[in-house]
Amino acid sequence: MGRVIGIDLGTTNSCVAVMDGKAPKVIENAEGSRTTPSMVAFLENDERAVGQAAKRQAVTNPEKTIFAVKRLIGRRSDDDATKSFSDLVPFKIKPAKKW
Amino acid sequence: MPDKKIQRPEEFAKEKITPEDKDENLVEMSLEENDALDDEIDEPEESDEDSKNTDSEIKDQLLRALAEVENMRRRSERDVAQANKYGHLAFARDLLSCFDNLSQAIALAPEDKSHFDENLKNILVGVEMISNEIDTILQRHHITKINPIGEKFDYNHHQAMFEVPNDDVEVGTVVQVAQPGYLLHDRLIRPAMVGVSKKTSSTDSKEENSVDKQA
């Protein structure tokens, strides 16, 4: 039987809940916390870290730790908001090759 | 009469009635109740088939309900096991600052204790004994300390607080532990707060220049 899940994609944290009978139940992540940082880090040898792990290594890898990208959803690269956002974050924002 | 659409009681019960059409159906029922009863007597075969259908539906529902109960039993079993395994995590987390302070207190005592009077020495020994006792208790409850000095930085267990320019060790080595971390089974209670080595600034600025040129 199909299960209903809901995802709250937040700018800084995200949360997942599943319908358990009539009430929603928040699912904990592997580390046991109910919210997970909305972050992803790209590391050497094609490794990827997400959530809490990505946050913990952010200091050592600021240019490849991506966060708060929810702010960019639906925006074009030449949007004013994109430019002002780009000034605030250590990672680079480039237009896609084809769009 | 046969061309008339008749709603038999069992059919009525079978249908899922939404609040909006409930009243309407009830009115229909009361008007055609007599017809429905007549019809039932006239066509017994069809009624049998209907009840067979209802039977299989009920069987299906029963099987689903049983499966759901089994799932729930397993889920609650797992939840209880998890709660037992990790239930003291928050409590342990709150206690960590006490352990930190205790070990700092011990670290404060000088190596050379010859000028200490007897009472002070006894107090120190007592504090060390308490600290050792705590370590044993933590081990018993599957809490392990993370003190990664000299190890490679591991984002699963360590939190990078700052970078230290250091060419003597490999890049990404933990060169300073500001605060040890703790694990409960495989779960982090607190990551170890660490300083991580990076290349010294001269090579850094070279890299930056080359990046600028490329851009």
Image (spheres, rainbow, N blue to C red):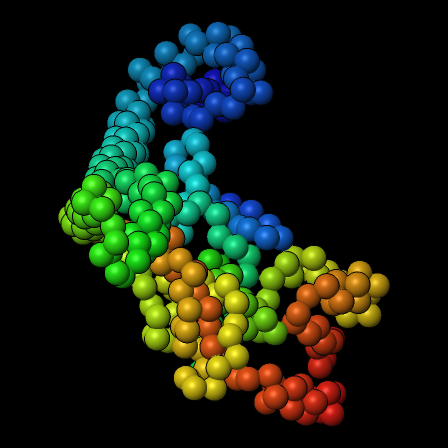
The answer to whether residue B141 of the structure is visible from this angle is no
User: Picture coordinates of residue B213 (x, y %)?
Assistant: 74, 92
Closer-to-camera residue (B128/A59): B128
Look at the picture and state if B18 lies above or below A56: above
Residue appearing at x 60%, y 62% in the figure: A67
Closer-to-camera residue (B181/A98): B181
Look at the picture and state if B121 lies above or below A97: above
Answer with left or right where residue B176 lies relative to residue A37: left
User: Picture coordinates of residue A73 (x, y %)?
Assistant: 69, 60
Residue appearing at x 58%, y 20% in the figure: B20
User: Picture coordinates of residue B158 (x, y %)?
Assistant: 40, 64
Closer-to-camera residue (B147/A17): B147
Closer-to-camera residue (B74/B51): B74
Residue appearing at x 33%, y 68% in the figure: B148
Look at the picture and state if B109 lies above or below B98: below
Answer with left or right where residue B24 lies relative to residue A26: right
Residue appearing at x 63%, y 58% in the figure: A68
User: Picture coordinates of residue B56 (x, y %)?
Assistant: 26, 35
Look at the picture and state if B42 lies above or below A81: above
